[in-house]
Image (cartoon, rainbow, N blue to C red):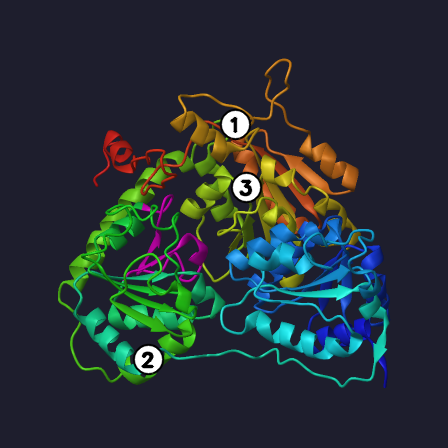
Amino acid sequence: MARSGADIIVDELVDYGMPYIFGVCGHGNVGFLDSAYRASNKIKTISVHHEQTAGYMADAYFKIKNEAVATFTSCGPGSCNLVISLAAAMADSSAFLAVTANVPTSQFNRNPFQETGFQNQGDFPSVIRPYVKRSYQPTRADMVPLAIKQGLQQLTSGRPGPVNLDVPLNVFVETTENGHASADPELSSGSIGNPAQLAKAVAELRAAERPVIVAGQGVLLAQASDALRLLAERLRIPVVTSPNGKGAIDDRHELAFGTIGRNGTYSANEATKNADVVLALGFSFDDRSTSAWLDGYTFSVPPTRIIQVDIDPQELGRNYPTHRGILGDVRATLEFMLKDIVREHQGEISPARGEWIERLGRALATWNSFQATHASSQQVPLRPERVVDALNRSLPENAIVASDVGVHHNWIVQLLETRRPRQLLQSWGFAAMGYATSGILGAKLAAPDRPCISVSGDGSFLMTPHVLATAKEYDIPAVWVVWNNHGYGSIRDLQLGFFGGRELATSFTIDKTGELYSPDFCKMADSFGVASAKVDAADQLEDAIAAAVKANVPYLIEVPVDRDIKPVGTGSWALPPIPHAEPNFLMQARQMCLTV
């Protein structure tokens, strides 16, 4: 039976198991929308108010469900608006299918309305080439079945990532009798690392005096948290996470010591920089997680030996030389180690292991004591530690928190207690502002029975405030906590710290008077028909969060936060040639008479 190109695409999305498509209409994708209309009892269309939001929602949906959905955008500016969210997903190994429309093939090279064609005809795929795993452009309807099959299978095979299907307008509409080519949504390599190398790695971990496991986002992507915990318990190895791996282990586990890097915990950075063997699982050793590769701040390589397991061969040894580089899926590799090596391996754990764990326990206790002194502050504007502490204490255990990009993100990474995988969503690699503000809608659609809270700086929230309209239109009961510090706080801190106190374009002010400015976020929410509350005193915050979650409707909470309190440093970061900052935690802890 003859089917249009759009019918083939929509049928494949349904067969693949996608419950949603997110996007914005345009003249280029009207043929696609007609097919989506006829399949609306099988796949729900969510129309948003900016294409960037559609991508962020799809990204967050994948991170929660480990299942991909699709976006739809039109030619020209419509699909160009999607580029930032594609880049964010690519940087964080998050998968969604971007169905972008293009001009009719009969008009290629004629400079029609919204053609990207100054270098090559219908050339939108070149716009996004660095930000997708692959772009497919079927130029005839009979090319669509193979393109959509390959595109869908590319999404989650190996390292996940976004894939583009760029479709000229006429290809959506024209029909073909070309056969059905179903994609396999379960396609995955599941590859196990080299058994001989794994056996040697386990022996070295047993013998090590100061071993540490670093859990990166690869543990979350592989759904390997249980295997990680079992391996750590059997070998009595401390576990730390990368910022993007938060949630890979319960923060309350006796072997969990926090997050490493620029704004990591004291105990985590102490662990990795003093380790003799590091087992890195799905961790890319990026600059913010490693204190910009500065020796002795987060890692000391050498003498530390690194055993690195990753599904992406490009990551092995990219930023640090590996003692053992093991190519493989993290979960399959850990389960193999547990089943076939650890259980049968002969040899005792190093007798120094207990002392090592106790040493890190003292470091963690010092860190917690330091933070507790600020978490109870009642000042207004609120201290950042007070805000994160309120989130820790008032949110249900199964809540999902999405952090937007900004100085508040540093505090969230450093202090938010994560109890389970994907409890925290963030745009880590590309740091795309607006990610959480928009993405929290995708998270809620993926987990309708879990409270979903976005923590967004005022700067990030103002990037995509139209999400309130989408939440109202589709009755998506997300909560937005707007962290109001009147500016782009993280960049303001860099200006003040490295450029002699000079500041420009990082505070929100009235130009004529210099007075700090902020829109009334509660009135803004009210104009969208969204419930809201403004926190005027520190002791109101927990009740406001609890009330917002209980209301189960779209809800905004505005919180004034002290803009001049900066996260304490336990690591560093470098932007050459600007000199890097030195960690200041030890100095502050000693001033407070804490034992370190």
Residue topped by disc 2: 194
**Residue 477 visible in the shown view:** no
What is the spatial separation of the Cα atoms under label 2 and label 3, in whole angstroms?
50 Å
Q: Compared to 333, does 357 lie above or below?
A: above
Earlier sequence position, callout 1 versus callout 3: 1
**Residue 311 visible in the shown view:** yes
Q: Compared to 344, does 372 lie above or below?
A: above
Bounds of the magenta segment = 238-265
Front in this rendered view, residue 123 or 444: 123
Q: Residue at position x 45%, y 42% from top? A: 410
Residue topped by disc 3: 542
Image location (x, y in percent) of residue 330: 40, 72
What is the spatial separation of the Cα atoms under label 1 and label 3, in whole angstroms?
15 Å
| Quadrant containing the N terminus in the rendered view | bottom right
Q: Amino acid at mark 3?
A: Glu
The residue furthest top is 513
Q: Nearer the viewer, mark 2 or mark 1?
A: 2
